[in-house]
Amino acid sequence: MIFDDIYNETYDNTIKYVTCKCDNISNIADIMQNIYLQLYEVLKGEKYEIKEIEPFLIKLARNELYKHYSLKDKFKFIFNKEDNIKLSDIIDNVPDEKINIEEELINKCRLKDIFAEIKKTDLLTQKIITLYYLQDIKIIDIAQMLQINESSVKSKLYRGLEKIRNNLAEEK
């Protein structure tokens, strides 16, 4: 599959993800550019075979968003609003940190297996795991959303995770 095909097939879902996570629309174009630049570098390197391109792109997007907002947070307290220095000028001059793609691939190689195990749990547990880990919603907020006790959310979450860990350990 060539880069243009991958770009055309994955752009819509990637931009939806990035747009949901950005707090400023003007950042989206830069973040998307960096995501696809990283993908291009990985594909050009020919060291790795990417079996599932969309989860890989979402991971790149998550890393890029984290990098973007962590730099922003690091510098926002250094200068007062009265200073004439713009935060974007500082961030543009900070060298990009290289993400270790090999390490990321190794760490996420079983992502598909994990999601398959999550799908084996009951629907309520799936919702709780998704809301807690993928949407970063607090347990108390999940309990309110699903209209169940906070202790039930914790119980479902931890028992579901234990079951998933056990099933994945058996597969090794």
Image (cartoon, rainbow, N blue to C red):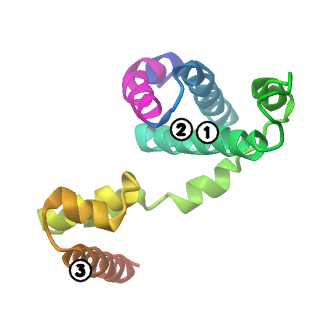
- Category of crowding for the residue at label 3, using alpha-carbon neighbours closer than 10 angstroms: few (below 14), some (14–19), many (at least 20): few
The reply, left or right, for residue 25 in relation to residue 48 is left
Query: Callout 2: few (<14), some (14-19), or many (20+) C-alpha neighbours within 10 Å?
Result: many
Q: From the viewer's perspective, is the residue at label 1 or at label 3 nearer?
A: 3
Q: Position of residue 165 (x, y in %)?
A: 36, 79
The residue sitting at 83% across, 37% down in the picture is: 79
List the residue tagged with mark 3: 151
Residue position marked by numbered label 1 in the rendering: 64
**Disc 1/disc 3 C-alpha distance (Å):** 35 Å
Q: Are marks 3 and 2 in contact (CB under 8 Å)?
A: no
Say left or right for 134 vs 50: left
**What's the amino acid at mark 3?**
Ser
CA distance for labels 3 and 2: 33 Å
Magenta segment, which residues? Answer: 7-20
Q: Secondary structure at mark 3?
A: helix
Quarter holding the C terminus is bottom left
Q: Judge by depth and name the residue closer to the eye, 26 or 45.
A: 26
